[in-house]
Image: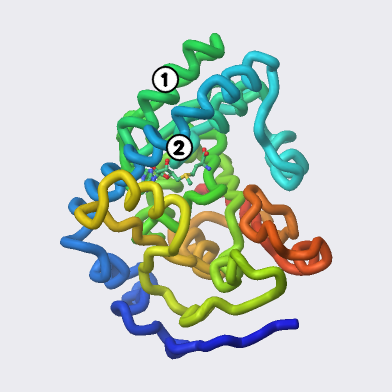
Amino acid sequence: MLLLKEVVDSCTGGRDGPPLTRDSLGRFSKSGEAAMPGGHDDFHDEMARAWDVVARETYRGEFDDHVALLRAGQHNLLEPEVATLLPLLRGSHVVHLQCSHGLDTLGLLNAGARPVVGIDISAEMIAQAREKAVAANLSAEFLCADAADPPPKLSGTADIVYTGRGAVPWIPDLGRWAAAVRRLLCPGGHLFLFEGHPLDALWDRDADHLILRTGMNYFNDNAREHPGFPASVVQRELGEDRPRMLERCWRPGQVIDALLVAELSLVHFREYPTQFWDQFPNWPAGIRSSLPHTFSVVARRADAGE
Ligand SMILES: C[S@@+](CC[C@H](N)C(=O)[O-])C[C@H]1O[C@@H](n2cnc3c(N)ncnc32)[C@H](O)[C@@H]1O
């Protein structure tokens, strides 16, 4: 049973700032960034500082388990990724955007990719990823950079840009991100995105049945900080004087639209009941399996003349 507790925002943008808009040429405007503190660069620094804390306080403790999995030759791909991404991986040059502490990136090597490059905004994440590669005896390059502004030396190098599992909600400007994805891809290269479904942000995580969280609106484009992980870790460590972890519930249609504007061709879009973390531990299995929790998008860089 769906209990509608309360909906306060309008269906055209909510209260926290202006919605994402596009100009007459169809490009995304910077209006999405206006809701962020001080513009893109300040936002970048705040994000990096927050994720450094999460890296130290949460992921450092998982280091040995990650290394053991990698040393056993395994990867961390979930079933929808195995079905679609795995066949494309063998011998492919992969750039992994928002690679975090590197477990998933290094797992791509075990799944057949060669070479792989991981990019993340957090220096602490990148340090852990490099350390993990050495401990697992795997060779990958890890670079500290913004996913929306990757190093120029990587332009046109990627057969596959891989990203997702909690990555895209942290991107404030989808237009800038999609342009970066296109720049990274070689002609004929593919983006593979496997991401959490934005519908999940609507549901109360502690409830034992389906309850809409107070004030949530699927059509609200504005940045907001969600309660719980990872903001709770940063709050615990830094207190009130901490960077805010603002994220957005980008809808699949917005992601696809941004990729089309960046002149990538849509190859596939699918939704799944698969979860990549247990957000609703108290739900009966029947509710869990009757809703989408993840989606995947494959897009191709097809150049003129193809
Ligand atoms: C929830 S984690 C996603 C992890 C990823 N699925 C994995 O485990 O490989 C989000 C990651 O995005 C990174 N991040 C956030 N904003 C970013 C940005 N603009 N550019 C690059 N990395 C960013 C964070 O530092 C964090 O490591």
Categorize mark 2 by other alpha carbons within 10 Å: few (<14), some (14-19), many (20+). few
In the structure shown, which secondary structural element does the residue marked by tag 1 occupy?
helix
Judged from this view, the residue extending furthest toward the left is: 38
- Asked if residue 142 lies left or right of residue 276, the reply is left
Q: Is residue 53 something that shows in the picture?
A: yes
Badge number at residue 130: 1
- Which three-letter amino acid code belongs to the residue tagged 1? Arg
**Residue carrying label 2:** 58
Q: How many marks?
A: 2
* Alpha carbon distance from label 1 to label 2: 17 Å
Callout in the foreground (1, 2) = 2
- Asked if residue 189 lies left or right of residue 110, the reply is left
- Which three-letter amino acid code belongs to the residue tagged 2? Thr
73 above or below 155? above
- View quadrant of ligand 1: top left
Most foreground residue, 160 or 195: 195
Categorize mark 1 by other alpha carbons within 10 Å: few (<14), some (14-19), many (20+). many
Most foreground residue, 156 or 54: 54
Q: Is residue 269 something that shows in the picture?
A: no
Q: Position of residue 78 (x, y in %)?
A: 71, 41
- Residue 171 sits in which quadrant? bottom left
21 above or below 151? below
Q: Position of residue 203 (x, y in %)?
A: 60, 71
Most foreground residue, 81 or 223: 223
Most foreground residue, 30 or 221: 221
Residue at left 33%, top 39%?
Answer: 53
Q: Position of residue 97 (x, y in %)?
A: 45, 40
Residue at left 76%, top 43%?
Answer: 79
- Residue 28 sits in which quadrant? bottom left
